[in-house]
Image: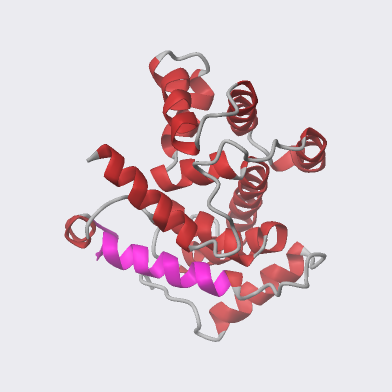
Amino acid sequence: MKKNMKIFILVLVLSQLCFVQVFAMDSSKPAVNHEDMMKVIQENKEYLDEDFIVTVTTIINLQEANPNLNAYEVQDILSNELTTRGLISEAGDVWKSLTDAEKVLVVLFPIQALLVNVAKNKTDELTNTYYLGWIDGDVGNSFRHAMWNALMTKSIGKPLAKAFADAHENQGLTDAEYKANVWHGFNGLEHRNMDLHNNQKGRDCVKWYEGLISDSTIVKRVQEKIKNGEMMILVK
């Protein structure tokens, strides 16, 4: 059952990445460029969580010390080291907070995962600036999801941004299980559908050739979609 679930998650992740070769099971996966990683960290240190940097660094070190491990073997070992043994408790908490699909992507794309973390923290700051006190399902939450996806699209491209966003929303639950959980007057499936819709609207705010677009311009585009009624908002 566990093996079948891993295969399902891998198919789910890679189905979002038509441009990616299936190298999760391939021992010849190229090594991470440390210069690129350090550049990302230095340029974005204001918006990077230290615990997430530790997590990504641990992944890279584990891969380099054991080049024949596939993505799921790395994931299993990392889960054991960061959580069961408690070697790095804070990083372990970061790892445990990820969905299984997110963990696969972080292992496969560690440098891009750092940029996803940057986008998340920038988004949290912007959301609290424009929609202080937001709650799940309201206009602030719609802005938050769209903004996160727009910033990811800017930094890692739309296909990979979609993969990370979809992985984040994939809690491994059935529709019935989602519906059984209700908050702010709406069930989990309704909240999830809202998030997926607004994630897509956010990715649509950035074109593939707009790598230098400013964050302030992205904010305006997201807010314009809200004003035009393009966003899904549950809690009015």
Q: Residue at x 45, y 15 (%)?
A: 86
Foreground residue among 28 and 194: 28
Figure check: 8 above or below 43 = below
Quadrant housing residue 6: top left
Residue depicted at x 72% and y 72%? 208
The x and y percentages for residue 146 are: 55, 66
Q: Nearer the viewer, residue 78 or 89?
A: 78
Image quadrant where one finds the N terminus: top left
Q: Quadrant of residue 131?
A: bottom right
Nearer to us in this view, 236 or 188? 188
The picture quadrant where one finds residue 232 is bottom left
Magenta region, mostly helix, strand or loop?
A: helix
- Residue 58: give x, y in percent of width and height: 60, 25
Q: Position of residue 96 (x, y in %)?
A: 42, 33
> Is residue 134 shown to the viewer in this render?
no
**Would residue 35 be visible to someone looking at this image?**
yes
Q: Is residue 162 rendered magenta in the image?
A: no
Q: Residue at x 46, y 62 (%)?
A: 15
Left or right: 119 with respect to 165?
right
Q: Tell me where residue 3 appears, x and y as whole percent.
A: 30, 40
Is 124 left or right of 178, judged from the image as shown?
Answer: right
Tell me the magenta residue range. 182-202
